[in-house]
């Protein structure tokens, strides 16, 4: 298996489990936001949204 095949399979897996990835990203974003004292909330929210848009 080459790198291109691996990326293709990873993409297929991400599409199949989109809802789980989105939920996990939201939880991770909340934890990071809390641990940074909500200092970077806008940046974290944008990163989470970007990840959710791409899956």
Image: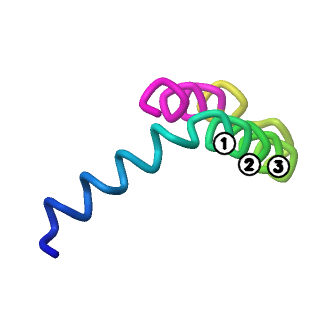
Left or right of residue 7: residue 16: right
Label at residue 53: none
Q: CA distance from mark 1 to mark 3?
A: 10 Å
Secondary structure of residue under mark 2: helix
Q: Which residue is mark 2?
A: 28
Residue drawn at x 62%, y 43% as measured from the top left: 21
Q: CA distance from mark 2 to mark 1?
A: 5 Å
In depth, the one of 43 and 25 nearer the eye is 25
Mark 2 touching mark 3, by CB under 8 A?
yes
Residue 44, x across and y down, in percent: 64, 35
Label at residue 25: 1
* 47 in magenta: yes
Mark 2 touching mark 1, by CB under 8 A?
yes
Q: Which residue is mark 3?
A: 31
Residue drawn at x 35%, y 46% as measured from the top left: 11
Magenta-drawn segment: 45-55
| Residue 50 position (above or below residue 17) | above
């Amino acid at each position: 298996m080459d790198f291109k095949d691996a990326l293709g399979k990873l993409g297929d897996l991400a599409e199949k489990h989109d809802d789980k990835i989105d939920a996990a990203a939201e939880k991770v974003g909340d934890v990071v936001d809390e641990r940074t004292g909500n200092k970077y909330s806008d940046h974290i929210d944008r990163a989470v949204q970007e990840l959710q848009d791409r899956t």
